[in-house]
Amino acid sequence: MITLPENKGVSSALNRGFDELFQDPAITYVTWVSSDNVYYPGFIERLRRELEHGPDSLGLVFSTFRHIDASGNSVHDDKQQQALIRYQSQPHHELLNASIVGVSFMYKSKYARLIGGYRLPPVEDYDYWLRLSEVCDMKFVPELLMDYRVNSTFSVSASLQSQEEHRRWRYIFQIAKHEARARRGIPVEMNILMPVTDIATAEPLLDKLLEQHYSNCIIRLLDLTPEQQAASLLPRIPDPRLIVTPRPYYSVKEALIQAIGETTTRFVVCYGVKPYIAVTDLYELTDFLRPLEATHAFYYYFDDHSNIGSGTVVSFVPPEWNYVYFTHRLHQALEEGR
């Protein structure tokens, strides 16, 4: 038993414990648990068996789990539980977009020794899975092996009640993704251009945008405010993808046309006026458009979100709000004077 004289958070405690464990070369499989969750009798045996009988390259296994309340009652119905299983069953490269591993897991100590300890609280587990998946393979076991207590005293969800706390969590979450893409040499895929004419209007729109699951982008705030105030948003809404571009005395149309002409990423979006409806909108639109470069120019959601539309020709620039465009199609339209 290790007693820590001071509470320095989950990352510090885990690193202290694993530093001790990893002094023993005989330790092959490791996991960690939280006192407020419920682990089923087969939790350790089932996950250990997957690692033991899997290929040597398999270093991380994870199972599904059930959300429970303070009294131990299930929070979700069967349909929602199946949705969680589908979410966790995504291809493993989707870990860069979403934390599909969850809270029920086990991994090999030899791979853990390669990547260093936990960091980036309060997303230390997500950052750890990203780094671990860069040195080994991972596998999902679609079996219920534990109960996760939602909003318990010590859970991350309980600590994200205020807007400020949620923004901080979101910022660190994006830092983990940003650093992972840099380590893997993945280029930025999209520019999102957001004209800012009024700070009070821009702040809630930007907050909504930063909730999107899709994150491989740069978000350029085109500052059209008379006193160039867009930079004042950054301390309140931090995000590693945000860039403020001063555009004093420009109209919205002029600023967008110039910014489109400067854009070099594969996709571009002009964001403003209205937020996306679902947090997966940008992800889904980009996923639809990505393989259609030879035939299509853009994809978009209908205003009522009832369907997805597309187009093969750009009729005018600047384009429609919140459509996802191939950048070269907009460049072509600019050259042709549309």
Image: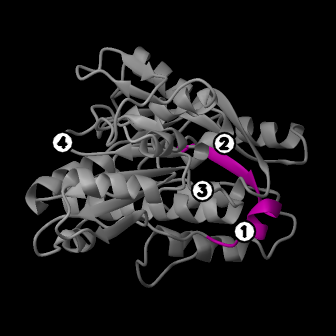
Can residue 170 be seen by looking at this rendering? no
Q: Mark 4 against mark 2, which lies toward the viewer?
A: 4
Instruction: Give the CA distance from mark 4 to mark 2.
Output: 33 Å
Which residue is labeled 2 in the image? Answer: 93
Q: Give residue 183's mark.
A: none
Mark 4 touches mark 2? (CB < 8 Å): no
Residue drawn at (44%, 85%), measured in percent from left and top?
5
Q: Amino acid at mark 1?
A: Ile
Q: Mark 4 against mark 1, which lies toward the viewer?
A: 4
Q: Amino acid at mark 3?
A: Trp
Mark 4 touches mark 1? (CB < 8 Å): no
Mark 2 touches mark 3? (CB < 8 Å): no
Please tell me how crowded label 2 is: few (under 14), some (14-19), or many (20+) other residues with Cα within 10 Å.
few
Q: Amino acid at mark 4?
A: Val
Which residue is labeled 3 in the image? Answer: 32
> Which of the marked residues, 2 or 3, is nearer the chain's N terminus?
3
Mark 3 touches mark 1? (CB < 8 Å): no
Instruction: Give the CA distance from mark 2 to mark 3.
Output: 24 Å
Query: In the drawing, does residue 234 fall left or right of residue 9?
Result: left
User: Residue 278, percent across and down?
Assistant: 32, 32
Q: Amino acid at mark 2?
A: His
Which residue is labeled 4 in the image? Answer: 273
Which residue is labeled 1 in the image? Answer: 115
Please tell me how crowded label 3 is: few (under 14), some (14-19), or many (20+) other residues with Cα within 10 Å.
few
Question: In this picture, which residue range is highlighted in magenta?
Answer: 102-117
In magenta stretch: residue 112: yes
